[in-house]
Amino acid sequence: MTRHGETKTLKRLNTPAFLQIKRKHGKFFVKPSPGTHPSKFCLPLLHIVRDLLKIVDNYREAKKIIGLGYFKVDGKVCKDNSFPVGLMDVLSIEKMNKYFRILPDSHHDLILHEITEEESQYKLCRIIQKRTIKGGHIQLNLHDGRNILIKVNDPKNPKEDNYKRMDVLKISIPEQEIIKVLKFKENNLAIIMSGKNIGQIGKILNITKRFGPKASTVSISQQNSQITETLYDYTFIIGEDQLEINLPNITN
């Protein structure tokens, strides 16, 4: 049961423009559940199953097979048809031997990019905040809503604290073990995750820090030697000397 004033649907006119919705699906559209990703920058699971992958034709069939537990998000079975699948999430359909990562794209903002089963075992998460909690331990808050605790042996000398905001963690899923830390720094590889240049990829040439994240900028050199300037918070590290994830039309 929803709380007073809440609905489980959206009018199609109020949905984000990047959602690929066909007219035949009517006046209303599934509303993403609150949680891991912003409602205006995610793909509801039912939308993926019915509209993008076209596994079924209608809402009722999509809801039924989702309820059967055929789909995993980040290694965990998901039975919520309105679950918000967002940036860098991994969707696994083991019965079909199909695996996908959600990536930013210049045409649709978010797309499903097919990956291998091996690559579906990990994802990239950006640190959006970190704080010290009781006992001197470090809590990392990540872009997909998850938190990771870093245990510190000596709070006065926290050698384990090697993390900064904007760094990206390569973690195993669903275990959440840190495989690698990708630093937010010049010469590392990045993808633009929002704004007019969304989906562009290249090497960070320069980071200009000014007061406030909306004032700070990052210059990125693309493969065609074109230089793009974007906002600090729009930059997502995806590798150092080489890419850590497979991208459309790019080989690692």
Image: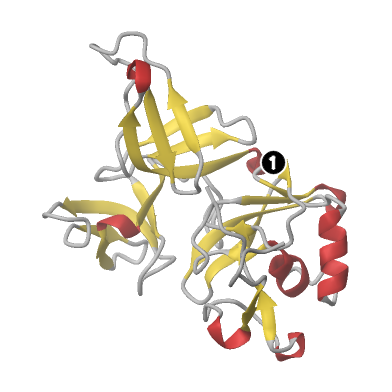
Q: Amino acid at mark 1?
A: Gly
Question: Residue 222 location, x and y as percent?
Answer: 34, 62
Kindly give the residue lying farthest to the top in the view shown: 154
Question: Residue 40 location, x and y as percent?
Answer: 50, 69
Q: Residue at x 52, y 77 (%)?
A: 16
Q: Residue at x 35, y 70 (%)?
A: 195
Q: Residue at x 53, y 60 (%)?
A: 103
Q: In the figure, residue 22 lies in which quadrant?
A: bottom right
SS class, disc 1? loop
Question: Residue 182 location, x and y as percent?
Answer: 38, 37
Q: Is residue 147 left or right of residue 115?
A: left
Q: Residue at x 70, y 70 (%)?
A: 47
Q: Is residue 188 left or right of residue 118?
A: left
Q: Which residue is mark 1?
A: 75
Tell me if residue 71 comes above or below residue 135 in the rendering: below
**Which image quarter is the N terminus in?**
bottom right
